[in-house]
Image (cartoon, grey):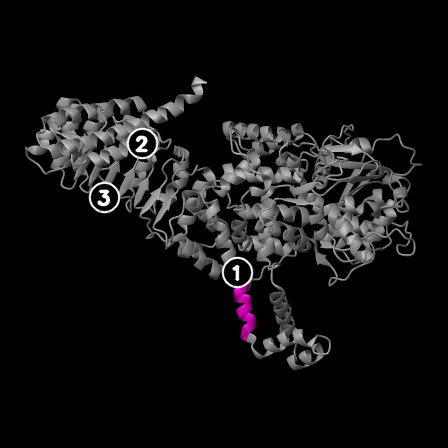
Amino acid sequence: MHVDPLIVERHPAEHKPGPFNVKHDKSASVTVEELFQSGLDTRDQGVNVLLYGAVGTGKSTVVRKLVLDWCSGSMLSNFHLMVPFSCEDLSKMSKPLSLRDLVGRKYIHLRKTPMLSGELDQARNVLFIFNGLEKMKLDFRMASTELCSDPNEALPPGAIVVNLLRKYLLPEVSILVTTRLSALERVPQKYVTRYAQICGFNDPARQRAYFTSRLLQQTGKEPRKDELIELLYLNLRQESQLAAACYLPSYCWLTCAMLHFLHYTDEKAPIRTLTGIYTSFLRLNFGGEVLETGGGVSSEDEQKSLMLYVVQTVGKLAFDGVTKKRASFSEDDLEKLIGGATKTDEELQKLAMFRTDVLDFFLVPCVESKRSYDSAETDEKHYVFAVPAMQEYLAALYVVLGENKTALEKLTKQVSTTLGQAEDVTTLFSILSKFIPFKIFAVFNLLKLFPSLLERISRHSKGHIARTMATEMFRSEDCFNEDVLDQVEQSLLGVHGPHPEEHLDERSFELYPIFMGGLLHYGNRRLLEQLGCSIKSETVSQITRSLKKQLVRASRKKLPPEETMDLLTLLYEFQNPRVTVEVLQSIRVIDLSTVRMTPLKCFVLSSVLSCCPQGFLLDNLNLSSCHLTQDLLHLLWPAFRHARSLTLPFNRLGPESCILLRDLLLEPNCTIKSLQLCDNNLLDAGVRTLLDSLPKNQSLQHLSLMHTGLGDAVALELSERLASHTGLLELNVAYNNIGDSTAVALVNACREHPTIHTVHLYLNQLTDVGKQSLYELQQGGSGRHVRVLASVMEGSDISEDWRPILSIIGKNSISWERERVREQLQVFLRDLEWGRQQQQSFWKKRHFHRVESGVKQTLLMLDKASAVGSGPSNN
């Protein structure tokens, strides 16, 4: 499904062109086909249509769709021949060719077509398309471009285009030219029959249609797709900063690519990274472009990569904003960026083009300033990056390319390059000494005498970049923020529900170091080379060595779960297995508890751990309260193979999830020693599935099935199967639906087991008779002694395990069924009061009072939580 952007027939003089000032445009939309319909007096000549628009408005997409529709016969059927050309390709041709040879070279089957012979009026039904005129040098002056009416005469490609537009060569043909705003004046008005402006998606309805069609194309997961589109549409309707950016179809493409990356990444999809998406986005819009003036011909030495100039200017603005924690910029900031000293006419022309095509693409009026783009107020407007992450990407690129070097570092780099190219160093210095002041030349002599100084300065610079990455990655003020992937998602879908107000210039910039790591990856460096931004392998090597040391040092500290997720994201973006392994060697525990795991985060975790050799094992992989589901467990399978202890409490795992966990335990080389499945609704069916792994598994030592919905029937099966697994040390089946007789049978089975030393049974359906039976069983009978945690009381005395029982209940009471917990705590109080009355010793009574106080404290905490939870409903 294709969504047409708004196209308006309008002369540039009638309206100030710009990418973001068409929001409230009420002009009637036209189609490209309507622009070529008859009705104009062209004196038997073809129509010249100039379709102009800002970078990213969809000009190339419209052309591609137009060609496809013509080929299918659904549009422009009055033209018998359509000949599309890329002006970028034409600009690279230096050899003179005739029009017929030019067409035949690209379309071999048209080499001898009579429609381009120039005879009679056969060219009347021909349409030429020249896409991207800003990439060609056209000169309409007679002295520069000679007249030509012969389609067989060889001319430079630019001269052919000029003569076609002049209607001197094949005057009957119609022509469609697309161009950016900066190149509008390259074609004189007298050669244009109709002007039309392409305005992009100027309303949320077009944007929603685009997002729906793209996500439909990319995934078949209907429910999740609809939810994403609805959240995205709500954000667009709120006139958010994203809505302002999405007037450009290019930013809609970026948004869709990001959503697909965040929500539909899995092991079957090709490896994609956040940095790679942004690099591809820039390659799509600015690939292969140079900064040059519209007139004359510049040599290659005088031409400069447009993207490199973007990094040196807009990237510097982004970097200054990141370092100063600023996301909005004033008119003065922009003027300092491209203004400055007096400039020549040629420089001013370059800057005008740069401002029109580049600044207006990256920077948009700030929505939070509540000022319209067309406002007549005299107050200064503020601007922000169209997509917040773009500021961090360009800042990272600015640093990695070394554009933030000191003057000394830049000087030594230039000297190094010059020395490398010079054959006679002495001659070079003797020449330079005549032109360079003595104090500056001292630096050159110093480098000549001590060449190691240059290398030392270079290493220091790369080390500074790595330290910057590590410092920005683990800033203490950001440790309570959500992980960066959640921040990216919120920038796209918005934050729904109550959330604290955050000023625009108080936001964190945690993607910045992650982008720096991603830019060092070979794939991104290759794309950047096509943009004229080269990152040398030596630079990458130096930064990598220093970064590895910084990350190893940081990873040895206990990081908050969100910071740990950010570290894993950085390693994933880096895509350097060797560095990943060396960093992970210093990590024994990965704690991601409370991080909202998504398919992407699960994939990142598994991808990073898969870089490690099979023998690498974490002491603990903590994924408690991570919203894990059965589908996410499949993505985490490679990560589970690198863990000795797997902590999965408080997730959304059901009976079906146990099939995968059973298969994990049945693997021949299973390394799982501890499996914590507390507070998951596994039910009897799920636990029964897990029991199938006991006979063949040899690694499991600690198994927690607390609060999993376990009943008497499967608990009895468990007691019968324990004998088949000889390595188990601890079994936790607390807070389930186990009755007296089943509890006694389970404890008996544990006493007969060769290794089990602890079993948890508290908060089950145990009566006073059942607790007494368990106590008597521990006091006598055959079998080993097993520590049984069933109550705070043992007979008439306090259990040695009252502290761990109350501690576990206290930690989980708020998330558990509160009435049941309250009832059990009250039973504890009743038992404690009865036990205290049986005691004669003052010290023992005092000990009972202390334990009662602990139970009452837990009850009080539970009541407070209940009051807070029911508060809103009472209002």
Residue reaching furthest to the front: 842
Label 1 to label 3, Cα distance in Å?
A: 49 Å
The amino acid type found where label 1 is placed reads: His
Q: Earlier in the sequence, mark 1 or mark 3?
A: 1
Q: Are marks 2 and 1 in contact (CB under 8 Å)?
A: no
Q: Mark 1: which secondary structure? A: helix
Whether residue 104 is visible to the viewer of this picture, yes or no, is no
Q: Where residue 409 appears, x then y in whole percent? A: 60, 66
Query: In the rendered image, which quarter contains the N terminus?
Result: top right
- Mark 2 neighbour class, 10 Å CA radius: few under 14, some 14 to 19, many 20 or more: some
Q: Position of residue 85 (x, y in %)?
A: 76, 46
Segment tinted magenta in the rendering: 452-462
Could you tell me the amino acid type at mark 3?
Gln
Q: Main secondary structure of the magenta part?
A: helix
Q: Amino acid at mark 2?
A: Asn
In 3D space, how far apart are the residues under numbered discs 3 and 2 (Cα atoms)? 31 Å
Reading the image, the residue beneath label 2 is 812
Q: Quadrant of residue 804?
A: top left
Q: Is residue 543 visible?
A: yes
Q: Secondary structure at mark 2?
A: helix
* Dot label at residue 698: 3
Decide which of tag 3 and tag 2 comes sooner along the chain. 3
- Residue occupied by mark 1: 464
Residue 456 in magenta stretch: yes
